[in-house]
Amino acid sequence: MGIQDIIEGKKQWRAHMARVKALPRDYRIVYKEIQRYFFKVGPVGLTDGTLLSGILDFFEEGAAAGKGVLELIGDDVAAFCDDLVKDSPTYADIYQESLRGESGTAEK
């Protein structure tokens, strides 16, 4: 990754966050909770940028339609997040697999 890639990534992130700031307050709060949850859980696909931008698109559409954020995702933000990444590996999954691999190798 070169310096140009880093600069471009920062520009994209700032543009993304400007879109988040333009959301209604309840949407911003839930978006930040989702973001915090994903940064903690660590779905592997998070770094490609499509997951969070897809959620932002979804939220912008819901806000434009006049719906409340909980009408879109339900009352349980963590369950909504889990459903989004249920078939995606997380960094925790990869770590667990590496531990199983190490312990399996040690037993042989």
Image (tube, rainbow, N blue to C red):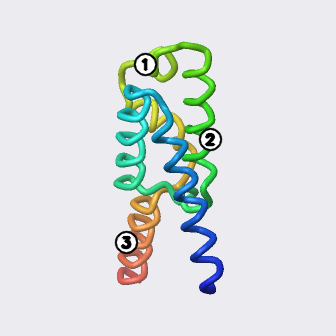
Residue at far bottom of view? 2
Residue 95, compared with residue 66, is above or below; it is below
Number of marks drawn:
3
Describe the element under mark 2 as helix, strand or loop: helix
Q: Quick one: quadrant of the N terminus?
A: bottom right
In terms of depth relative to the viewer, which is nearer, 72 or 29?
29
Q: Residue at x 54, y 46 (%)?
A: 52
Marked residue nearer the N-terminal end (2 or 3): 2
Q: Which residue is mark 2?
A: 54
Q: Which numbered tag is attached to residue 41?
A: none
Among the 4 quarters of the image, the one containing residue 97: bottom left
Q: Which numbered tag is attached to residue 99?
A: 3
Percent across and percent down for residue 71 are 48, 14
Residue 74 located left or right of residue 53:
left
User: In front: mark 3 or mark 1?
Assistant: 1
Q: Are marks 2 and 3 in contact (CB under 8 Å)?
A: no
Marked residue nearer the N-terminal end (3 or 1): 1
Q: Which residue is mark 1?
A: 70
Describe the element under mark 3 as helix, strand or loop: helix
Three-letter code for the amino acid on which mark 2 is drawn: Gly
Q: Say few, some or many: other residues with alpha carbon within 10 Å of mark 1 (under 14 / 14 to 19 / 20 or more).
A: few
Three-letter code for the amino acid on which mark 1 is drawn: Leu
Q: Cα distance, mark 2 to mark 1?
A: 17 Å
Q: Are marks 3 and 1 in contact (CB under 8 Å)?
A: no
